[in-house]
Amino acid sequence: MTEQTSPDTIYKGLDGVVADYTAISKVNPESNSLLYRGYPVQQLAAQLSFEEVALLLWTGELPSQAEKEEFIALERAHRALDSRVKSAIDLLPLDAHPMDVARTAVSVLGANHPQSGDSSPEVELRKAQELFAAFPAVVAYDQRRRRKQELVEPREDLDYSQNFLWMTFGEEAPEEVVDAFRVSMVLYAEHSFNASTFTARVVTSTLADLHSGVTAAIGALKGPLHGGANEAVMHTFEEIGIDKDETREEAAARAKAWMEEALAEKRKVMGFGHRVYKSGDSRVPTMKQALDAMVKYYGRDELMGLYDGLEAAMAEAKNILPNLDYPAGPTYHLMGFDTEMFTPLFIAARITGWTAHIQEQRADNSLIRPLSAYNGPDERHL
C-alpha cells in the first residue's frame, strides 16, 4: 500500500477512531455502566470472586462450578515466586520503580515458559491463567524487599485476594480488607481499548507471544498519562498533609483550599475526569463504598475529609468528577500498600483484561499498521 501523504483528517491520538470490534467490554451510554461481557461491573463486584470475573473475561461466560474449581486449583498451584524471577528482581536496585520490576518479571516469566513459542488457543489461555496466578508474588515480594522483609510463601487454603494480602503483609487480612481489595481488582480488570490494552493488541497483531504483549502493556501503563493516577492521588493527599488528629471537616476545608489554589495555578490534579465517561466514571460509586468501609474499619475520618474537600472543590470549579483512581489510591493506602506499589496492583487486575484482548486479537488477527501523513521537507538531493 502506498504511504498516505495528504489524508483529509488527522486523528491525533486516534481520538474517535474505531480500530476494531471487541466482545470483551463496553461502556453502555444509556446506563453509563461499564459492562464485562454484557454484565454491569458493579454487579460483578458485588457478587463474584475475582477468579470468577477473570474466567468471564477470558471465556465470555460465567464459569460452571466445575470450571471454577479447575481454575482455582491451577491458580493455587502457580502462586509461588519463580526462583529465576526472584533472582532477576534481586538484581534490580531498590530505587527502581516497581513498574520496572513488574515489566522485568513478566519478561522473565515469558522467556522461561516451557511453551513460549506456542500461541494456540488452549496454551494461550493457560499462559494467561498462570500469569494471573504468578504476578501477585512479584508485587508482594517487591514491597517486602524494599522494607527489608523476607519473602512470604503463598498459602493454598486462601483465595486469590486473601493470599495476595497474606504474601504482602505476612498475616491474614480481616474480611473487610479482603473484600475491599477484591472489589478493586474486579473494577480494574478491564476497560476496552485503553492505551495499554491497545498496545498489547498491536504487539499481538505482529504474532508476538502473550508475555511480549503484556510486557509492552506494562510499559504503556507506566506513562503518567495512562497509569499512576492512583499513586498521584496519594501524593496529593501527602502534599496537603495527612493529620490523624484532624476532624473530617477540618481536613476537608484544608483540602478544598489546596485545590482552589492548585486550579488557580493551572496545575493538573490527577484522579479526576475520564475520556470515555461523560457523566462520571461508573466504577467510582462501588470503589467509594470500599473506601468508606476501609475508613470506618481503620477509623480514619481525616482521610475522608481530604477526599471530600478535593472532590467538592473540583466539582464546583470545573464540574469534573472523580475517576476510579481517586478512591482506589487512599483505599490501597489504608490497606498498607506503599504508594509506589499502587500501579503494579493495577497490573495484577488488568492482566485479565490484557490477556483476554490478546486472545481476541489472535483469534481474528490483522496486523495493526496505520498510515501517517508526511509533513517533512520535500524531496531533496545531496
Image (tube, rainbow, N blue to C red):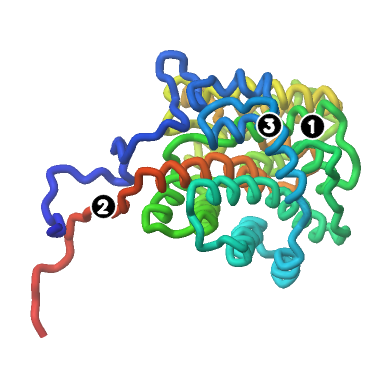
Q: Which residue is mark 3?
A: 68
Q: Label 1: how many residues lie within 10 Å, few (<14), some (14-19) or many (20+)?
A: many
Residue at 70%, 21% in the rendered image: 289
Residue at the right extreme? 171
Residue at 54%, 20% in the rendered image: 40
Q: Position of residue 324 (x, y in %)?
A: 58, 31
Distance from the alpha carbon under mark 3 to that under mark 2: 40 Å
User: What label does residue 320 carry, if any?
Assistant: none
The answer to which of marks 2 and 1 sits earlier in the sequence is 1
> Disc 2 marks which amino acid?
Pro
Q: Position of residue 308 (x, y in %)?
A: 66, 23
Quadrant hosting residue 8? top left
Relative to 342, is 150 above or below? below
Q: Which residue is mark 2?
A: 370
Q: On the picture, is 332 further left or further right than 3? A: right
> Disc 3 marks which amino acid?
Lys
Question: Dividing the image into 4 quarters, which one contains the C terminus?
Answer: bottom left
